[in-house]
Amino acid sequence: MRNNIRKVYASIISFSTKRWLIYPITVLLTLVISIILFSYCSLAPFGTGQYSLAAFDGNIQYLDFFSYLKDVINGENNISYSFSKGLGGGFIAVFSYYLTSPLNLLVFFFEKEDLNSFIDILVIIKILLAVLFMAIYIEKRFEHNIKRVYVILLSLAYGFMQYNIAQSSNIMWLDGVYMLPIILLGVYYCVKFQSSLILTISVGLSLIFNWYSALINAILTCLWFIVEMLASQVNGVKNTCRCVIRFVVSGVIGICLSCFILVPTFFELRGGRGSVNFNEMGDRFVGNPLSEITGFVYGSQSSWGAASLFVGSVAIIGFLGFLFEKNSFKSVKIGILSVLGLIILSFHFEPLFFAFSLFKGATSYWYRYSYLASFILIFCASKYFLHRKTHNILCATLFFYVLLCLVNLNSSVNSDTRVWLTVLIGGMTLLLIVLEFDVVGKTNAVVSIFLLLVSVLDLGLNSVLLCQKYKIDTNPYVTYVSEQVSQIEDLKKNDNDIYRINQTLTRNENDNHLTANYNEGLAYGYYPLSVYTSDPDSTQRDLLQKMGYTKNGDNYNVVNTSILGADSILGVKYILSDYPIEGLSLVDEISEANGKNVYENPYALPLAFFAKADLKSNIINADNSFEFQNKLYSLLIGEEIEVYKPASFTTYVSDNIENIVIDAPSNMPLYGQLGPFYAPSSLNLSGKYVQGYSQWSSPSVFYVPRTEDGSAFVEVTMNDGTLSGMNERIFYYLDVNELSYAISELKYNLPEIVSWNNGDIVLKAKCDDNRSLVMSVLFDSSWDIVVDGKDVAAKSIDGSLTYIPLDKGDHTIHMSFKVKGKIMGFIITFAALFIITAYVIVLFYRKHVYFQKNTRVSG
């Protein structure tokens, strides 16, 4: 044990000054390359700053999440619960997935309009950490025996590999990339020196920073443990069992270290996407493993059945050298290549893909775990450059580039120019590597410098091409945010009551009125109907679906219109709309912003009101969302009412365009629903605007405006030009007189809202008789409800909205949201911290005793 302590201590801190310089050199090189790269590509805030890597989900979701985080830091929103999450809900699972990296705290120094710059700078920082930690890993794992230039080059290869640029829009996944080398260094120390500290702490931190990428790392960590066992030649059942137990205990304590965030996340995910649906797992074999070769060409992208593992020419040449090297232990080589082969197989075999994607249908952003394979390629190259044998490397590299040309040339995947450029620079790199092996003295230093420059050019060219593919224009975002923040502030100044806001137009909306930007409530600090997260609340999604706001995929509901009857029940007092809507009145005091005016809903209920009937039997079965709302209103007021009434219509078909003319009373909001026909189409709604339909992000229920003469029509055009499959046409108008009556009944003797904050509500109610207090708050067992000092169990209306039965008299109601598992999680984390602290104290005590004895002996 003492000998192992000495080895660990020596490995961590003892090496020459020249070796120590590797770390600042790699950091400085990374910083210089990144700034030049980002300036050349005009990525904010560098160069002209016109573009950003915050594309795709970065643009749709993460910019808004970082706006929310900025509000949290400023004390204007809440981590545990937020009414800005759609209809409101626990936020721990969303926070732990997207925002727990401590680097995100830098958002404090950026304005909301400048968040594109923040994300780009965050990408640079995470690339820099990936390079630095990879340099540390290579240095420690190979005990400072690899020539410095190759440590630097392979570390740069890890930082600027294809994954880091291509997945930069999913900024939180990069936390897993830079933590992987430290975790696997911990595995090495655990096996080689019986030291668990690095593995335990790195596992815990990785889970805290982003549990999703940490679990991906865990897959390779378990496989890599076997590789390190083979490399360290652990023999005998006893030694093997000890090693396995040490590894397992280290990992478990690391997991416990993160339980203060993991346990509450687990409890919250059970109400969203925490379950595993094996129906999402296919059984096909897709693509061809040879297709991975196409991914080594500059600017290559991963696609279903073909992953891009570009890590630069030095790493590829080193991997080929390792592949054909004869002097390494066969068992170790077989182990490493088996793990690599398993990962490559997972790119093509659906059950393995499902497992590596953590048992979720990850059918986008291919492949979110591919950096595991890139790491192994670089590790193999490191093993090769440890010995630097030229045997077979020329033939192997030549064969590889010939194969690369055969696979890529005249294909639709990569252009011939990029293929030839890849081969040319790869050949130059090979020549310089061979020269560097053979020459000595000052000439060797000159060759190393040229090798470094060519490698930087190699990685830089690929990064430039990827940045061109993955960047977006920042100007629309800056303009939109500036105007939207101002409009919301003006609205709050004009009306500081408690209400929800809906809107018909968002950022990044297509010409056909389709959008996926549903987190603006989080971004700008108001209570919306919509939210788009990886952890949607199933209760919320079900309720909105029944109300007419259809589900889209696993993440959000389509809320790009205003269904007035639904909005009124849910407390939507204002609608930000780019067109007038029947039944709403324009708010003249607030100016237009981003093409949207503010309209007031005179029928909006407050977020708490009394039902006029007994709600014990409240399960609602309805044929469509209009009838559902009719039955919900009837239930609440205690009498049958039809706020929605069927509208008659006539259909004409001409030139594959179906024209539906609707006959309904004037001044009544009109809605339609078609299908199901599952064929992408466009709806021309009374010539006022075009709505995409029956496709991704399209609504189910749509609002039909009126023409100037009061008529209304819908023209249905299938995108493929052929009308087919539509077997249902439903049109209803909202009888505002009936709606007004229902709302007036529900507004009688309203409770007083004393305070309504995220996760904390205080109400006062005066009941003339036994009443049911209804709140447009989602039913959740995490709410603690106290009425007049006594705990009360809340009930739900149709499993969604919350209501509390009250007796006659005056009442004070206090609702507080309790995060499940929070106390348990903190206790486990503190226990893990205690164990780690005790371990460190024992470790340093033994080291002290060892050095004292060693000093006496030498004296």
Image: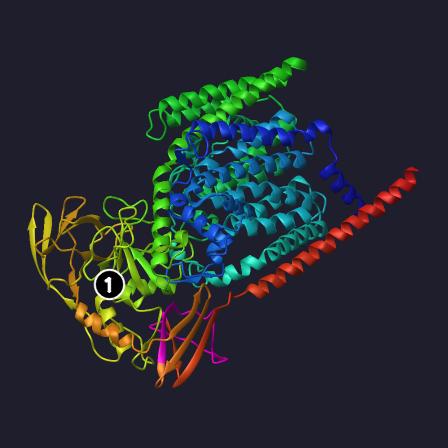
Q: How many marks?
A: 1
Residue 402: x and y, percent? 44, 22
Coloration of the structure image: rainbow
Q: Furthest residue to the right? A: 859
Q: Amino acid at mark 1?
A: Leu
**365 or 703, nearer to the observer:** 703
Q: Considering the image in quadrants, where does the C terminus appear? A: top right
**Residue 381 in sight in this render:** no
Residue 786: x and y, percent? 48, 77
**What segment carries the magenta color?**
772-801
**511 or 356, nearer to the observer:** 511
Residue 598 sits in quarter: bottom left
**664 or 821, nearer to the observer:** 664
Which residue is located at x 29 percent, y 80 percent? 612
Magenta span: predominant SS is strand
Residue 307: x and y, percent? 43, 37
Few, some or many residues within 10 Å of mark 1 (<14, 14–19, 20+): many
Per the image, label 1 sits on a secondary structure element best described as helix
Placement of 756 over or under 409, stated as above or below:
below
Which residue is located at x 46 percent, y 36 percent? 165
Placement of 496 over or under 620, stated as above or below:
above
* Magenta stretch encompasses residue 234: no
Residue 582 sits in quarter: bottom left
Residue bearing the label numbered 1:
564
Left or right of 513: which side holds 21?
right
Residue 760: x and y, percent? 47, 67
**Residue 599 in sight in this render:** yes
